[in-house]
Image: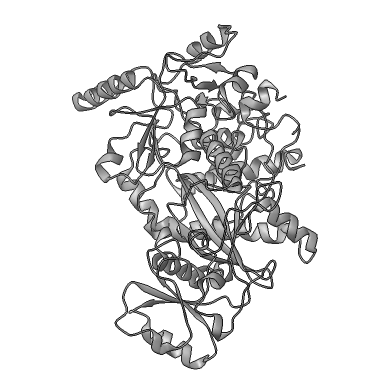
């Protein structure tokens, strides 16, 4: 059975050491208990006068917890109560359970690591006096509903809610968000989900930063690039192309192109792309990888890859002969295509793990590749991490302005995306597309196993903060009044993530921060948030900031940001002074 500390932090009790952020697919990284403070990342005295003369500075002091958030005294009162049985409401539903702060100076959060009985047995305490509400606005599949139900959330029927899941918000809806509310979409993610914009962003970064961004097949957006497409086809008459709508999904509108005459100059909202005609196949069938990626903040960027995902297979055996080019069953790996084909049972289970003829878990794929022995799985998984990081760096300068303009608090938004990646015969990974609304339908056993765990771990990673909404509204109204009257005083301290309180404002100031000798509770808010989130990561592996190599990816940002520089410097300082941390 899990120990209280292990369940409280969302990690397995048999994990006694910290694992580097990259990890491997199919295994969860182990993390320390969220309720216990780790040693400070530095030892020794605070910056000396000599250090200050060299331009080394300490960051501004962290802000105090917002008065509407569950206080230490209130949490202590929860802990003092002994409850023998799992409490249920009048409808037989369980309550949310509170997890203690995962890092000194951060807020308590709602645990999402098993059912109520598991959490109570592990020593966590139910929250009986504050309702946790989820606002469903649009599609919410069974894995989503299950995760919120297990965590003790109730569906919201009014204006009050803690977390929203569904469609993107309007600018007006973003503007009204409380500091501790979360919604599952960033504004401006068309830069990631619309194929023409995604490919353009990656191509521009390749021109600026080099071959690190060489993971998207050559493409032509029509009608703008029509002449370039014709020229390319004339130089390479045997080359195969694939035609796709710029903003579509589920295999709709996709077809093979063998002759330039099949595409006309007046074609709109379509892109033509070099076809990967030498895919790595298993049992003679091509497949792609559905990789689940989450961002929990954009500035600083906090980016994760889930340890498990799906390998989705085409139904027919792969062939690049002209006779088979029009067969969707041969060339398309979309599950929505496979399940509609005649005489195909796409959900027929083929092994004890629930894998089917058209869909495997990444666990199964890893086992197959390792059994083949041609390349180590880490060769594939490291490419996945790099593609995810570089893709986000390509779109970050375009999404960030939308967030800055529309979203009032840096932690309001999070999002989970589906990255579709394909391997060629040389085991080079290629990004095919990114789905900003990945399907979370659970039609098969392997779907349920992967997606239920992924969404539950995502909710735990987010760490939704319990707070009194009425008190929050009263405090914010008082602050607004004080600002208007020029009193400039706020009741009971500032907010835990108040704008401008999280660190240096300039890149130069961030680079000058000295973390040596700094206590955990004195770290800037953005650093403590990173550490608390890392303690809750469960099956999510952090991509950025990259803990095993803190400066990895940092010089690839198109726009340097002080928050990213400061967080990476913190991890670099800790790695230098605590080499055991990577052991």
Relative image position of residue 178 (x, y in whole percent): 34, 31
Q: Which quadrant: the C terminus? A: top right
Taking the image as drawn, is residue 518 in sight?
Answer: yes
Relative to 477, is 228 above or below?
A: below
Relative image position of residue 536 (x, y in whole percent): 59, 34
| 109 horizontally vs 374: left or right | left
Disc tally is: 0
Q: Which quadrant: the N terminus? A: top right
Q: Residue furthest front?
A: 343
Taking the image as drawn, is residue 525 in sight?
Answer: no
Snapshot quadrant of residue 451? top right
Q: Which residue is drawn at 40% across and 70% down?
A: 253
Q: Looking at this view, is 431 or 398 the one in front? A: 431
Relative to 15, is 130 above or below?
A: above
Tell me which colouring the rendered structure shows: one colour
Relative image position of residue 126 (x, y in whole percent): 52, 16
Snapshot quadrant of residue 53? top right
């Amino acid at each position: 059975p899990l120990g209280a500390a292990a369940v409280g932090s969302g990690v397995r009790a048999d994990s006694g050491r910290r694992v580097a952020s990259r990890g491997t697919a199919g295994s969860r990284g182990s993390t320390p208990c969220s309720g216990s403070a780790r040693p400070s990342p530095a030892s020794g005295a605070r910056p000396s006068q000599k250090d200050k003369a060299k331009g080394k500075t300490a960051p501004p002091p962290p802000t105090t917890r917002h008065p509407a958030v569950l206080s230490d005294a209130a949490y202590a009162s929860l802990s003092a109560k002994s409850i023998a049985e799992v409490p249920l409401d009048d409808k037989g539903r369980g309550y949310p359970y509170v997890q203690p702060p995962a890092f000194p100076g951060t807020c308590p959060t709602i645990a999402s690591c098993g059912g109520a009985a598991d959490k109570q047995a592990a020593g966590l305490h139910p929250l009986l006096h504050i309702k946790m509400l989820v606002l469903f606005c649009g599609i919410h599949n069974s894995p989503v509903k299950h995760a919120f139900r297990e965590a003790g959330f109730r569906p919201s029927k009014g204006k009050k809610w803690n977390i929203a899941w569904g469609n993107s918000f309007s600018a007006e809806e973003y503007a009204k968000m409380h500091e501790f509310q979360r919604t599952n979409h960033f504004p401006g993610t068309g830069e990631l989900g619309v194929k023409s914009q995604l490919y353009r962003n990656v191509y521009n970064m390749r021109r600026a930063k080099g071959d690190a961004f060489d993971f998207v097949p050559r493409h032509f957006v029509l009608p703008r690039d029509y002449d370039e497409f014709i020229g390319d086809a004339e130089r390479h008459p045997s080359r195969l192309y694939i035609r796709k709508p710029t903003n579509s999904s589920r295999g709709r509108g996709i077809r093979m192109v063998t002759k330039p005459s099949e595409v006309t100059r007046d074609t709109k909202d379509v892109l033509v792309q070099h076809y990967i005609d030498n895919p790595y196949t298993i049992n003679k069938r091509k497949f792609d990888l559905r990789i689940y990626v989450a961002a929990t903040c954009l500035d600083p960027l906090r980016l994760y890859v889930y340890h498990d995902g799906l390998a989705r297979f085409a139904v027919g055996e792969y062939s690049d002969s002209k006779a088979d080019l029009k067969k969707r069953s041969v060339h398309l790996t979309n599950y929505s295509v496979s399940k509609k084909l005649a005489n195909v049972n796409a959900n027929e289970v083929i092994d004890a793990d629930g894998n089917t003829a058209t869909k495997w878990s990444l666990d199964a794929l890893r086992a197959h590749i390792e059994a083949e022995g041609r390349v180590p799985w880490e060769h594939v998984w490291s490419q996945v991490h790099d593609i995810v990081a570089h893709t986000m760096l390509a779109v970050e300068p375009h999404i960030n302005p939308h967030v800055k303009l529309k979203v009032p608090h840096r932690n309001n938004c999070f999002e989970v995306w589906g990255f579709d990646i394909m391997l060629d015969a040389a085991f080079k990974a290629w990004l095919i597309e990114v789905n900003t609304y990945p399907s979370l339908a659970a039609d098969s056993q392997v779907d349920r196993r992967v997606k239920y765990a992924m969404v539950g771990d995502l909710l735990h990673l987010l760490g939704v903060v319990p707070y009194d909404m009425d008190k929050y509204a009263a405090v914010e109204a008082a602050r607004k009044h004080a600002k208007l009257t020029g009193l400039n005083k706020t009741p009971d301290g500032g907010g835990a993530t108040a704008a401008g309180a999280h660190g240096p404002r300039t890149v130069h100031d961030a680079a000058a921060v000295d973390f040596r000798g700094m206590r955990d509770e004195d770290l800037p808010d953005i650093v403590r948030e990173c550490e608390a989130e890392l303690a809750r990561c469960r099956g999510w592996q952090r991509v950025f900031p990259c803990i095993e190599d803190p400066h990895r990816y940092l010089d690839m940002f198109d726009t340097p940001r002080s928050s990213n520089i400061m967080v990476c410097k913190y991890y670099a300082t800790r790695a230098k002074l605590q080499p055991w941390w990577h052991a």
